[in-house]
Every structure is written in C-alpha cells, then in structure tokens.
Image (tube, grey):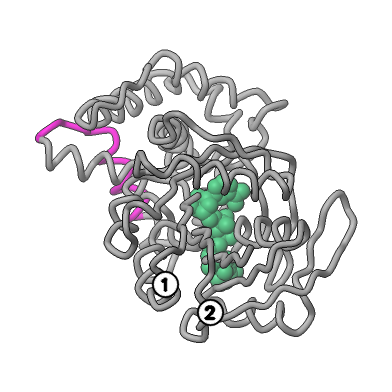
Amino acid sequence: MKIAIIGAGAMGSRFGYMLQHSGNDVFLVDTWKEHVDTINKNGLLVEENSKLNSIKIPAFLPEEVVEIPELIILFTKSMGLKPMLKSINKIIGKNTQVLCLLNGLGHSETISEFVDIKNIFMGVTLWTSELIGPGHVKLTGSGNLEIQNLDPTMGVTAKKICQTLNDANLNAIYSKNVVLSIWKKACINGALNSTCTILDCNIEEFGQLKNSKKIITKIIQEFSQIASKYNIPLNIDEIVKNVEQTYDPNEAGEHFPSMHQDLIQNHRLTEIDYINGYISKKGKEFDIPTPYNNLLTILVHSKEELLIK
Ligand code: NAD
C-alpha cells in the first residue's frame, strides 16, 4: 500500500519504519529540513533494544510532495496539523484515506476542512517513541492502537486499515467508540502533562503531592462537563483511578510527560491548546466555568513565553 506519513517526528518515524518494513511503499513528509535531508542521505536510523538499523525511506518537505497516496497517517504535533494539511492538500486524493493519531482534542473538525468525512479515520495510540536527533529515532516499549471511521458507512475500510497496521505488528483494533477513547486519553494528558510541566516534576513525584488527587479530580470534572455537551459520557472516578495508576514507577511514574520534555527540557512549544486549552475554549463557548483548565493553559503559555525566545 502507498502510505504517506505526514509529520515524521518520533511517532511518524516509528510508524513509517514499521509499515515500510512490512512491505508497504512508504514516504515521509516533514517540515524539519535537516531531518528530511539526513533521512535521504543516510536512511532513517532506527534504534531498538540497543540495536541500530538503517532503513531507506524517501522523505520530503511538504512543498516537494507530488504523489497521491492511498493512506495518509497524520502524526504532526497538534499545532502543526492545520498548516501541514494546507501545504499537503494537493496530495489528498478523492479516495485517499486519512488516519489521525495525534493526541489532543478537536482534530477531526480541523481535518474535515480538508478531507471528505467518509475518508477520515480517527485513532488513539499507546505506542511511544523518541527522536534522538535528525534522522535518528528510538523505539521505546510496545503499544497498541484503536481506530474507527467517522462516517458510519466506512467500517469495512477502517477494518482494512487495521489489517495493514497489524501486518506491521502495530497491534491495531477496530474501535466501537474511538471518540470516547480519545477523550479518556486527553483527560489523562490533561491531568498530568500541564501539571508536571508547571511543577517541574515527574509523574511519581506529582502523585506524592498532598493535593494531587484534588487537582486531577477538578481537571477531569471540567473535561467531563464539556464532554457531556457532545454526549460523551466520561466516568470521572474511573479516569481518576487510571491517572493514579500511572504514578507507579513500574508504570509511567519515573517518566516526565511529553509536555515537560517539549517545554522544560527542549524549549519547544506545547500541545496545551488541544488538551487543557480545548476545555478552556469550549467552557467559554458553552458558558461552563473551567477555572482549573483556564489557569493551567495560561500558566503553560506563560512558561512558553519565558523559555522560548
Ligand atoms: P515530535 O515532536 O517528535 O515531532 C513533531 C514535529 O516536530 C515533527 O515535524 C518533527 O520533525 C519536529 N521536530 C522534532 N524534533 C525537532 C527538533 N529538534 N528540531 C526541529 N523540529 C523538530 O512529535 P511526536 O512525539 O512524534 O508526536 C506526534 C503526535 O503524536 C503528537 O500529537 C503527540 O502528542 C502524539 N504522541 C506522541 C507519543 C510519543 O511517544 N512521542 C506517543 C503517543 C502520541
């Protein structure tokens, strides 16, 4: 299958590598020129279980792509999604299927500005990955993903995409309610990413704070109030428990959430507007108070101002 990975950072490179390895005809598209040039010159360097492997995959800047793929997998950061879709619009064919695996909320609305709803597939993934440098990706742990069609008539196509992903050992399942899963993951990110970033602590340290339960419960309650406006039922107690499970050092406890890695460690912009910021924005639209998410959004943007010159 001809597959374009749009946004070939840590996750896009992992998926691109695994899909190419299983026999698909993959190309990568990314805005980072040094990364694109390095991949074209030396191949994509893939580090897995301390072994290094180089794989040839063509890589392009968005303005260079010409070929219309059968499947597009979107893996930009949330704030890069719309500009990227604008610049690769020419390779979204009438029958190109578009699968979105970004974290965060509101992406299907953005994609539907560029893609017919029948070709949009949404997903959520627990795979992880790290970009070590230009052209060099480290595959961490194992994972899975669930996907679903937005248009109810496109279930068979979604199952075929699952098959292609499974042939690449990506452990995909066809979801009966991917929107609920996306919201649940957004709640976990919403509870941990911005808090650990502002407090400059890892997940275990956050969990040990006297007020951690109160903070995450308030954040998740606000997510739930907004979700209910879209008829998405979130079980607050269950999600609080899911967040608390991650405090265990055998789970994610020792890790710093990706927002901490982006902002505190690497001075890069964050996905805050698509996590807590999305709840804050929708709270204003629906006239629902969301003070915890409002403050976290403002604090993370302020930290961006301080750290990114
Ligand atoms: P990423 O930051 O690795 O890549 C995103 C973009 O940033 C790419 O275009 C990349 O080329 C560019 N970039 C990365 N490092 C750069 C640098 N040093 N200089 C210049 N440009 C650079 O993003 P990601 O981690 O692959 O995340 C993509 C989406 O997947 C996000 O929505 C994220 O939340 C989600 N996600 C990530 C993980 C993970 O483990 N990384 C897991 C699940 C979901």
Q: Is residue 266 visible?
A: no
Q: Which residue does the image show at 49% across and 43% down from the upper left? A: 123
Q: In which image quadrant can residue 115 be found?
A: bottom left
The quadrant of the rendered image in which ligand 1 is seen is bottom right
The magenta segment is 287-302
Residue 131: x, y in percent? 67, 61
Decide: few, some or many residues near mark 1? Use Cα within 10 Å; few <14, some 14-19, many ≥20: few
Q: Which residue does the image show at 35% across and 26% down from the upper left? A: 220
Q: In which image quadrant can residue 255 be found?
A: top right
Q: CA distance from mark 2 to mark 1?
A: 37 Å
Residue 117: x, y in percent? 32, 53
Q: Is residue 138 visible?
A: yes
Q: Nearer the viewer, residue 247 or 147?
A: 147
Q: Nearer the viewer, residue 174 or 248?
A: 174
Give the residue type that dot 1 points to.
Lys
Q: Which residue is mark 1?
A: 309
Figure quadrant of the N terminus: bottom right
Q: Do the numbered discs 2 and 1 sit on residues whose CB atoms are within 8 Å?
A: no
Q: Which residue does the image show at 28% across and 45% down from the upper left? A: 278
Q: In which image quadrant can residue 227 be found?
A: top left
Magenta stretch mostly in which secondary structure? helix
Query: Compared to 249, does 75 lie above or below?
Result: below
Residue 4: x, y in percent? 56, 67
Residue 58: x, y in percent? 67, 78
Q: Nearer the viewer, residue 32 or 67?
A: 67
Query: Compared to 241, does 64 lie above or below?
Result: below
Decide: few, some or many residues near mark 2? Use Cα within 10 Å; few <14, some 14-19, many ≥20: few
Q: Which residue is mark 2?
A: 67
**Sequence-first disc among 2 and 1:** 2
Is residue 242 shown in magenta?
A: no
Left or right: 110 with respect to 81?
A: left
Give the residue type that dot 2 points to.
Glu
